[in-house]
Amino acid sequence: MKDENIKVVATNRKARHEYFIEDTIEAGLVLTGTEVKSIRQGRVNVKESYAAIENEEVFVYGMHISPYEQGNVYNVDPLRKRKLLLHKREIRKLSSIVMQKGYTLVPLRIYIKNGLVKLELAIAKGKKLYDKREDIAKRDAERRMRQHLSEKYRA
């Protein structure tokens, strides 16, 4: 089997705070050459992006890929919608899930896998404010416990 080289270019850390991640799926992206070069330099932002299904095709919106410096006339709009490459059965599955109340498609990270640009897409459900507070309280409690244990073993 091939050895998988994965280089993570950008992550959406805000997504795990804003949503409950139900499932993830890997998708390819339709990009121009200058966009790929810009992504290889790490000049991409997925923080405010989301995906939607239109006419049995999946598109990602709001993903900012900075123009490539040496790209001149070949550069495209940094915020244009980009098509995701998925199998038809995967799109149908995503479509049926997204039609349910509260589910959305959120890009989690962009990475380069064996020379190809891939996007990890999450099927997510939005968190309410009290869920976010609950997560923060759990993290604080775990941090305090770790600090207490480290102080106890230091003494």
Image (spheres, rainbow, N blue to C red):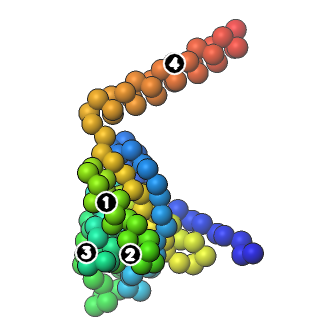
Residue 1 percent across, percent down from the top left: 75, 75
Task: From the viewer's side, name the closer residue of 58 and 62.
Answer: 58
Which type of secondary structure does the marked residue at label 2 adopt?
strand
Q: Is mark 4 on a helix, strand or loop?
A: helix
Along the horizontal axis of the image, is 130 left or right of 27?
left
**Residue 152 location, quadrant:** top right
Residue 38 is at least partly visible in this image: no
Pointer 1 or 2: first along the chain? 2
N-terminal label among 1 and 3: 3
Q: Which disc, if any, is residue 11?
A: none
Residue at mark 3:
54
At 45% across and 78% down in the image, what residue appears? 87
Q: Pick whichever of labels 4 and 1 is earlier in the sequence.
A: 1
Q: Can residue 20 be seen in this view?
A: yes
Residue picked out by circle 4: 144
Q: How far apart are marks 1 and 3 (CA)?
A: 12 Å
Q: Mark 2 points at which residue?
A: 84
Q: Callout 2: few (<14), some (14-19), or many (20+) C-alpha neighbours within 10 Å?
A: many
Query: How many angstroms separate mark 1 from mark 2 (CA)?
Result: 16 Å
Side (left or right) of 81 relative to 42: left
Tell me the residue that label 1 is attached to. Answer: 98
User: Of discs 2 and 3, which sits in the foreground?
Assistant: 3
Nearer the observer: mark 2 or 4; the answer is 2
